[in-house]
Image (cartoon, coloured by chain):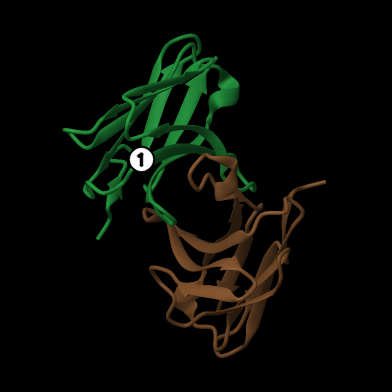
Amino acid sequence: DQQVKQNSPSLSVQEGRISILNCDYTNSMFDYFLWYKKYPAEGPTFLISISSIKDKNEDGRFTVFLNKSAKHLSLHIVPSQPGDSAVYFCAASEGHDMRFGAGTRLTVKP
Amino acid sequence: DADVTQTPRNRITKTGKRIMLECSQTKGHDRMYWYRQDPGLGLRLIYYSFDVKDINKGEISDGYSVSRQAQAKFSLSLESAIPNQTALYFCATSDPGQGTTDTQYFGPGTRLTVL
């Protein structure tokens, strides 16, 4: 029973363009949402988060949008850079119970 | 130096063997976690510990046990390894006192193969 789903296993974009990664969840009790980035042979690293009381959080080139009514969040990367190529995991938590999506592999082409 | 370290980084073992994966952290966090990652499934929680005396089962604890030897150390054991425990294992830590609910910090992972 996957409570957090990332339906696109991969995404390819051109350098300088926008990357949009999507995530859906089923548990309405989740109150905190995160995006992690993972390079090969490394552990996931925290990228950006958003509380359920907000609908947008921005940090430099990265913006996370939360649509609670649709149980959907997205990560926008503008402009995309080749160094952004990685696997991106979305996660949702209710207290200590954190659930992860399967990940989306982003490739940014020069 | 890395804040969260895992040993070994890679391990190949045979069915039925006992295996221990170790995690150490220098972040001073009270909470520690063990996850496994399988293709197409993301990360799933095996066990978590909120302090040395507090151990809790996660989503997929069957076949695993843990030991919290100190605030900085959290070990995961496979008492009798089986092939479907072949996966990438991650340790993580968090500190809810920072005000950002359960942002977790991960180690580099241990790739375990059970033949």
- State the image coordinates of residue A109 (x, y, percent, origin top left): 51, 19
Instruction: Give the class, few, some or many, for how many residues have Cα within 10 Å of label 1's Cα (few <14, many ≥20).
Output: some
> Along the line of sight, which residue is nearer the eye, B17 or A49?
A49
Work out which quarter of the rendered image holds the C terminus of chain A and state it: top right
> Along the line of sight, which residue is nearer the eye, B44 or B19?
B44
What kind of residue is marked 1? Pro
> Along the line of sight, which residue is nearer the eye, B28 or B14?
B28
**Residue to which mark 1 is pinned:** A9
- State the image coordinates of residue B4 (x, y, percent, origin top left): 71, 53
Q: In the shown orientation, is residue B11 left or right of residue A66?
A: right
Work out which quarter of the rendered image holds the N terminus of chain A and state it: bottom left
Q: In the shown orientation, is residue A2 left or right of residue A90?
A: left
Q: Residue at x 61, y 63 (%)?
A: B111
Above or below, A53 against B101 in this view is above
Residue at the farthest left position = A69
> What chain is the green one?
A
Q: In the shown orientation, is residue A81 left or right of residue B44?
A: right
Above or below, A82 against A95 in this view is above
Q: Residue at x 55, y 17 (%)?
A: A81
Task: Pinpoint the chain carrying mark 1.
Answer: A
Total number of numbered discs in the rendering: 1
Colour displayed for chain B in the image of the structure? brown
Q: In the shown orientation, is residue B23 left or right of residue B91?
A: right
Q: Residue at x 49, y 9 (%)?
A: A16
Q: Residue at x 64, y 59 (%)?
A: B30
Above or below, A85 against B30 in this view is above
Above or below, B28 against B77 in this view is above
Q: Tell me the element at label 1.
A: loop
- State the image coordinates of residue B91 (x, y, percent, origin top left): 60, 60
